[in-house]
Image (cartoon, grey):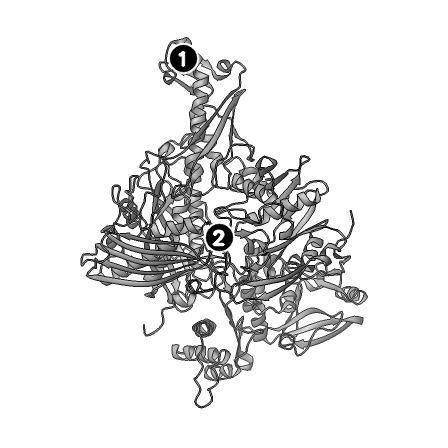
């Protein structure tokens, strides 16, 4: 009987620090870093991925928690969704906590991490619209103790990528001390992937509303004009409340910005229309954005 | 699903259960014998099987739903180190086509691929990954053909199969074809593709025997049929193929696809080694049979008082590429197309057609569930048009014992339909959240969802469903069972497979009841035992349970005859309780052990219910042995902006004949309702031009604990069916049939939208402004 079997993971390293992990990746460029493994192991089980080596990030204690840094929170990439969902974290960054609680069943939340959610960059990643709305930055660890910072949106849009042997170490999130909302529409009552999600944060210091729509495009979408318009309507020094009509208009503004009408057809051709499914998605985004703003201002 | 539905709802029924439930025998809530093993993870499922030196099998499946196979080159796979055998259609010694009902399905596609995932070749190798890689290395040249995916186009399309595209057509005509009613409502309904999604995917082990035969260790639900299919495929006598049933991880349809078992046995015979196959979830979705997607067109005629005059319907079942159980499903759909209502005139046309969609087959409640969703939607429409209450329109038309079905069959069994509907109607509604503010209100969309109380509307809907029991249309429904008593222990030997339906528990209860012995064991199943038939349509409760009872009674007579002779009285005057035999007057008494005197007592008996006949060319005939009925009231909350639906409560009243095991009955009903809720809201195996999309449990959303509603068993009507052993009716299928229609009715009430498609898509449950 032969011993031929496809190459399974030849080596598993369990570094204790971020720099050790980077060094392990430099030493073996074919190795794949693994944190919660909720996406990676599914790909392995499906036979789509057969890593030559694994660098486990689970024992790096410096990325399992968070600390404060000049008005920001520096979140370790190894924070699990379960940890982010807890009340102490929710008091700090409410929308991120809400998205973590909405992300999948408890088994997934116990294992899946913030950094993994960013690295996988799935369109339905629940933390991504929140990070986009917060305008979070990533602290990326590279060989030789190098650290560089990039906006999370640059990575999600593919403008800047992780280089060889680089790892997402931390996520720098501004502490806004104001209401934040994350709302997610799914097809069921139990845990499910988002059909659309909206993250909305108030930034009273900059007198702005920032909003990102997730799950409807490969990356979260920011309706910048709608944000500016609604930010100008809010009385930041007073009650902050808005009339129902303004909330509705904001919802429709956001939805139309994210799911625009088809471009006008050339003369003589039939004007294309949105399919009923897309119209429903647009209505869903409008309702989510309206509700999110309403809750943030209430 | 919450267990408290069983415990809190059971004491509430209007007919409260017997005050003191016995500890054993019929009527006891005897727990299943395998509960502990299953909860501790020691229960041996087929995927746990192991044999020294086993090889792993993998199948090569077609990525195309319809293609001509130009060539298959296995050389790359054969040459891979670690590969022991690669087989295609050329390597089948026996019959290359199989089918549980009609042998129209190739084990390996040879010229034409007819559905996405159809097997083309199989590999045995010394590692599962090697087997998969080798299967992927087989070079197949396809000439891709246009798939026929719209069943309406199958009639005119080129034949997809030598047998043609029309599998069966039933034109049912009953009464006067020209009758018309004063009020007419019409509708077009679509039912999606539900998958049985067994929690354990298919797995099995084939072990070659020294005599040239083979043993198949599989989680079969119909071992003798699978044995016969295997023997004919392997070119062996049936005696040289043995199917051993391993632990079945749940089954709500034909559990195992012979498409797995046959390549497994072929590979074992070819290599001389044990061969194991454990399907991935994706393969499981590709391989096994689904519920028939159905298109239904209805026209109901009624008089001004709401009495039904005539039902016209056209039913089109999408069978996929092969016939499988389509003929039976169509018969059920046509026969029950009018529902449990008295209809003087009916004209129902039903067709089952071949397409290149995934294969359809037996999933419990097949045929009956699809039509229930449609005829109940029609009853709602009729109620709205006549300004009648939803329950009133139904009560004016309900079927009762002695009425005639549109198939011409007289309903001779108990049919307490009105009583069931009144029970759910009169059960108190669940409180509105504003009435119990201390409770957390679980909004549609879930605990972390986007639900907003102001956008939530509550709806209440009703449905009545009916389903047949046992095989229909002349199927020989027979089961054989043996009961052995030795040393104070009774053993039941019966080839009825325990699928989770509770048959082994019931068998123990029957023997306890008849022989007064507590210690009853049920032997595991293989095909050396006499056949007991498939586990479907509740047949084991009825026929296998009946056979066990007869065998137990025969043992009882053997045991008591000598004593009765000695005491000079008939055996009927003796009774056995707790291992003691006493005479009716208590004067004479002895123990079972003493009476046995070291002997072993055996008896074998059969149960065969009265015969049925096929539906004739106008859909007439006594096709069914028995019928069971169910009424469900659904309460739903709908977020009318997002279209998200949460089923709050399902109140169930069911016609069960007799309660044999209250706890088990409650779990069967809860499981059935939950499966029905899945079909109503989320379960639909989607395809794009015949290719299955998202064949995984993320894409195919089964109900989770949060999706499952509170299930209240409001009433269990115990009117014994005199022709059934113990008078009991099987209970699993009726709630599956009825629940989707009830949920749709409630969503209709909440949103004012027509809801003519299942599962209900969010955009269909949005109350659109200006409408």
Q: Kindly indicate whether the residue at mark 1 contacts the one at mark 2 (C-beta within 8 angstroms).
A: no
Tell me, yes or no, whether dots 2 and 1 are on the same chain.
yes
Image quarter in which the C terminus of chain B is found: bottom left
**Residue at (29% x, 63% y) in the render:** B186
Is residue B441 visible to the viewer in this orientation of the structure? Answer: no
- Disc 1 crowd, CA 10 A, few/some/many (<14, 14-19, 20+): some
- Residue B367, position as x, y percentages in the image: 40, 52
Which mark is first along the chain, 1 or 2?
1
In the rendered image, which residue does mark 1 sit on? B564
**Residue at (37% x, 52% y) in the render:** B333
**Mark 2 → mark 1, Cα distance in angstroms:** 56 Å
Residue B537 as seen in the image, left or right of residue B272:
left
- Residue B481, position as x, y percentages in the image: 48, 30
- Disc 2 crowd, CA 10 A, few/some/many (<14, 14-19, 20+): few
Residue B484 as seen in the image, left or right of residue B608:
right
Callout 2: chain = B
Residue B320 bears which disc, if any? none
- Residue A194, position as x, y percentages in the image: 52, 66
**Considering only vertical position in the picture, is B231 above or below A153?**
above
In the rendered image, which residue does mark 2 sit on? B705
Please identify the quarter of the rendering in which residue B587 is found.
top left
Please identify the quarter of the rendering in which residue B401 is found.
top left
Residue A237 as seen in the image, left or right of residue A29:
left
Q: Identify which residue, B185 or B719, lies in the foreground.
A: B185
Please identify the quarter of the rendering in which residue B647 is found.
bottom left
């Amino acid at each position: 009987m032969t011993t031929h079997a496809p190459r399974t993971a030849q080596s598993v390293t369990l570094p204790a620090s971020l720099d050790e992990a980077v060094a392990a990746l430099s030493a073996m460029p074919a190795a794949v870093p693994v944190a919660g493994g909720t996406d990676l192991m599914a790909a392995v089980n499906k036979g789509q991925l057969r890593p030559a080596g694994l660098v486990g990030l689970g024992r790096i204690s410096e990325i399992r928690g968070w600390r404060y840094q000049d008005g920001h929170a520096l979140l370790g990439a190894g924070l699990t969704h379960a940890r982010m969902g807890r009340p102490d974290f929710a008091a700090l960054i409410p929308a991120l906590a809400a998205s973590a609680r909405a992300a999948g069943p408890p088994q997934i939340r116990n294992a899946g991490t913030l950094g993994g959610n960013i690295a996988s960059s799935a369109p339905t990643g629940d933390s991504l619209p929140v990070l986009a709305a917060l305008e979070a930055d990533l602290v990326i660890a590279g060989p030789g103790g190098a650290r560089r910072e990039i906006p999370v949106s640059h990575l999600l849009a593919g403008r800047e990528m992780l280089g060889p042997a680089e790892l997402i170490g931390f996520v720098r999130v501004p502490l806004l001390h104001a209401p934040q909302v994350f709302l997610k529409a799914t097809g069921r009552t139990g845990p499910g992937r988002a059909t659309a999600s909206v993250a909305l944060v108030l930034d009273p210091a900059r007198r702005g509303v920032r909003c990102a729509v997730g799950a409807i495009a490969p990356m979260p979408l920011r309706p910048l004009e709608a944000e500016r318009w609604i930010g100008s309507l809010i009385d930041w020094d007073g009650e902050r409340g808005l009339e129902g009509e303004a909330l509705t208009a904001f919802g429709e503004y956001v939805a139309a910005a994210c799911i625009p009408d088809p471009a006008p057809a050339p003369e003589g051709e039939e004007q294309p229309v949105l399919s009923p499914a897309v119209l429903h998605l647009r209505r869903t985004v409008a309702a989510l954005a309206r509700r999110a703003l309403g809750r943030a201002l209430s | 699903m919450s267990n408290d539905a069983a415990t809190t709802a059971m004491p509430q029924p209007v007919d409260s259960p017997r005050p003191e439930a016995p500890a054993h025998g019929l009527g006891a809530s005897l727990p299943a014998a395998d509960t502990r093993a299953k909860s501790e993870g020691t229960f041996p499922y087929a995927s746990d099987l192991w044999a020294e030196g086993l090889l792993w099998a993998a199948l090569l499946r077609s990525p195309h739903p319809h293609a001509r196979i130009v060539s298959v080159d296995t050389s790359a796979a054969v040459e891979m180190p670690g590969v022991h055998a690669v087989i295609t259609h050329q390597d089948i010694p026996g019959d290359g086509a199989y089918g549980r009902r009609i042998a129209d399905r190739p084990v390996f596609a040879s010229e034409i691929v007819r559905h996405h995932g159809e097997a083309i070749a199989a590999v045995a190798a010394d590692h599962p990954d090697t087997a998969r890689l080798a299967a992927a290395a087989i070079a197949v040249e396809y000439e891709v053909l246009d798939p026929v995916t719209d069943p309406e186009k199958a009639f005119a399309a080129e034949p997809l199969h030598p047998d043609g595209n029309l599998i069966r057509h039933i034109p049912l005509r009953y009464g006067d074809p020209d009758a018309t009613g004063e009020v007419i409502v019409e509708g077009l309904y679509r039912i999606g593709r539900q998958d049985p999604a067994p929690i354990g995917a298919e797995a099995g082990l084939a072990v070659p025997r020294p005599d040239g035969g083979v043993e198949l260790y599989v989680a079969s639900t119909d071992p003798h049929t699978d044995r016969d299919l295997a023997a004919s495929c392997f070119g062996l006598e049936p005696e040289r193929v043995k199917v051993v049933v391993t632990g079945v991880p749940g089954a709500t349809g034909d559990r195992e696809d012979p498409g797995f078992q046959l390549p497994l046995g072929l590979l074992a015979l070819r290599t001389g080694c044990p061969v194991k196959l454990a399907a991935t979830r994706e393969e499981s979705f590709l391989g096994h049979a689904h519920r028939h997607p159905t298109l239904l067109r209805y026209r109901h005629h009624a008089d001004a008082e709401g009495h039904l005059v005539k039902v016209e319907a056209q039913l089109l079942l999408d069978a996929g590429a092969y016939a499988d159980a389509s003929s039976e499903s169509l018969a059920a759909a046509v026969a029950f197309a009018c529902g449990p209502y008295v209809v003087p005139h009916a004209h129902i046309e039903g067709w089952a057609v071949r397409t290149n969609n995934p294969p359809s087959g037996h999933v419990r409640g097949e045929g009956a569930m699809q039509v229930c969703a449609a005829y109940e939607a029609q009853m709602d429409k009729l109620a709205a048009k006549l300004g009648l209450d939803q329950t009133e329109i139904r009560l004016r038309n309900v079927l009762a014992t002695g009425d005639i079905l549109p198939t011409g069959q007289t309903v001779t069994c108990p049919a307490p339909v009105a009583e069931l509907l009144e029970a759910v109607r009169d059960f108190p509604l669940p409180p509105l959240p504003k009435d119990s503010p201390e409770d957390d209100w679980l909004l549609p969309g879930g605990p972390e969802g986007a639900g907003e109380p102001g956008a939530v509307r509550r709806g209440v809907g009703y449905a009545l469903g009916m389903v047949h029991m046992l095989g229909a249309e002349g199927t020989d429904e027979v089961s054989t069972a043996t009961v052995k008593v030795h040393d104070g222990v009774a053993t039941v030997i019966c080839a009825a497979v325990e699928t989770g339906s509770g048959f082994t528990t019931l068998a123990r209860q029957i023997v306890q009841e008849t022989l007064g012995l507590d210690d009853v064991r049920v032997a595991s199943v293989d095909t050396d035992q006499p056949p007991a038939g498939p586990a479907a349509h509740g047949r084991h409760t009825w026929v296998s349970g009946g056979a066990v009872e007869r065998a137990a009674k025969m043992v009882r007579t053997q045991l008591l005859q000598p004593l009765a002779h000695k005491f000079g009285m008939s055996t009927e005057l003796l009774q056995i309780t707790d291992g003691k035999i006493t005479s009716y007057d208590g004067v004479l008494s002895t123990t079972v052990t003493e009476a046995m005197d070291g002997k072993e007592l055996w008896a074998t008996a059969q149960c065969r219910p009265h015969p049925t006949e096929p539906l004739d060319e106008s859909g007439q005939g006594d096709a069914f042995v028995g019928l069971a009925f169910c009424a469900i009231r659904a309460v739903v909350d709908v977020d009318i902006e997002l279209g998200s639906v949460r089923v709050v409560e399902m109140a169930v009243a069911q016609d069960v004949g007799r309660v044999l095991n209250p706890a088990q009955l409650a779990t069967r009903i809860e499981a059935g309702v939950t499966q029905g809720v899945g079909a109503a809201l989320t379960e639909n195996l989607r395809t794009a031009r015949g290719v299955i999309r998202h064949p995984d449990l993320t894409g195919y959303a089964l109900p989770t604990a949060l999706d499952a509603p509170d299930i209240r068993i409001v009433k269990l009507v115990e009117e014994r069916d005199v022709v059934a052993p113990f008078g009991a009716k099987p209970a699993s299928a009726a709630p599956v049939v009825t629940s989707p229609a009830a949920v749709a009715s409630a969503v209709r009430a909440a949103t004012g939208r027509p809801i003519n498609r299942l599962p209900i898509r969010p955009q269909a449950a949005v109350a659109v402004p200006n409408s």
